[in-house]
Image (cartoon, grey):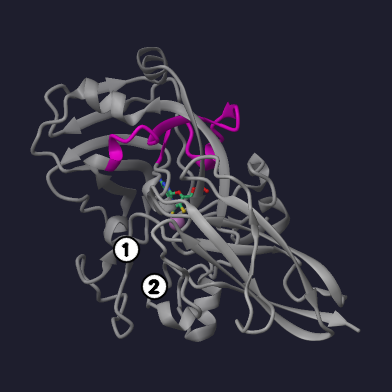
Amino acid sequence: MLVHQAEPYNAESPPGALVGSITPLDAFYGRNHAPIPRIDPESWRLRVEGLVDRPLELSLEELRHRFGERSVVATLQCAGNRRADLIEVRDIPGQVPWGPGAVSTACWSGASLADVLAEARVRPEAAHIAFTGADLSQQAEPPQPFGGSVPVAKATSSEVLLAWSMNGQPLPTAHGAPLRVVVPGWIGARSVKWLQCVTALAEPSDNYFQSEYSVLPPEADPHRAKPGDGITLGPITIHCAILQPGKDARLPSGPTEITGFALAGDNRTVARVDVTADHGNTWTRADLDPPENPWTWQHWRTTLTLPPGGIELIARAWDSTAAVQPESPATVWNPRGYANEAAAHLHITCRP
Ligand code: MTE
Ligand code: MO
């Protein structure tokens, strides 16, 4: 792991860990805003409340027995992934300088959130479902538990889980045990770990982190921004990464295999990935693995014949709505350094 911070623990997956369809538990990235809370799974209860006709309080055993287990393979990606490329455009103080490894894929298992909400009978005036974790973050003033919300339509989609298991193992403490939300296709921040409370609301969550995860205009001062000043992040957008060759690799010129993955946003699929080694004069279409589902990365590969010298490889992905990644991180720079959706760039050197 590439550890950015020991406490709270923030570490990205090394590139070699992202080549498989599923990321092993010990290589799955970790993103935390506070120390990992201590929870006794025996006395822990999930509360479901707010604009519901039947508030619930459920133990893990009750959740398992009343709702049964579903599994969904889904990629989680932090909205701060690839902030390092934005920092090269202009500094972003006080934020984790993530490289391209704040993204991983797991097979999540747990109860369908839709089933739990149906049991609680969400009232028609509820428009958002908020999640609150058990960890207290000092980043908020005064300190607050981590939380956020998604609209009712997303919360009641079949892919949204209250997960107690990851890759067939009990959910690790670092990833939210005893229970976490998994919101496939949305920024990682909405997949709240150490879940305590699910609340049906008329408005989005007023948790600090709901509005912190937003794109501010370039001239804004992030320390003075108020909720509503930015574009609140939700569904992720089309993204891709180059996995092979590695950054700054030195290799022989000639036919060279280039590999990577692409990830589409909520309910979209990856339509195409193109790669260039000549600044976009010619693009080669990569071979793309078929999608597992709309919420999981798709690996791709192609072979380019590379000349000797310094080379910049660029890969760009298109989604099923024909949205394409913008060329440069400068286009999308923002004061908190979120949602860097620019095309993947990588420098390598080829020997004659
Ligand atoms: N949930 C809680 N309770 N506390 C957190 O700090 N971080 C969020 C989300 N859920 C966070 C949380 C963010 S920003 C991301 S990207 C994902 O968890 C990361 O999940 P992981 O650590 O399991 O990879
Ligand atoms: Mo995140």
Residue underneath mark 1: 212
Mark 2: few/some/many CA within 10 Å (<14, 14-19, 20+): many
In-front residue for pair 335/256: 256
Q: Is residue 167 left or right of residue 8?
A: right
SS label for mark 2: loop
Q: Amino acid at mark 1?
A: Glu
Residue depicted at 46% across the width and 45% down the height: 294
Q: Which residues are magenta?
A: 154-182
| Ligand 2 falls in quadrant | bottom left
Q: Is residue 85 visible?
A: yes
**Marks 2 and 1, how far apart at CA:** 8 Å
Q: Residue furthest left?
A: 125
Per the image, is 229 magenta?
no
In-front residue for pair 123/57: 123
Q: Amino acid at mark 2?
A: Arg
- Residue 336 image label: 2
Q: Where's residue 252, x and y in %?
A: 89, 75
Q: Where's residue 146, x and y in %?
A: 35, 49
Q: Is residue 258 left or right of residue 343?
A: right
Q: Quadrant of the C terminus?
A: bottom right
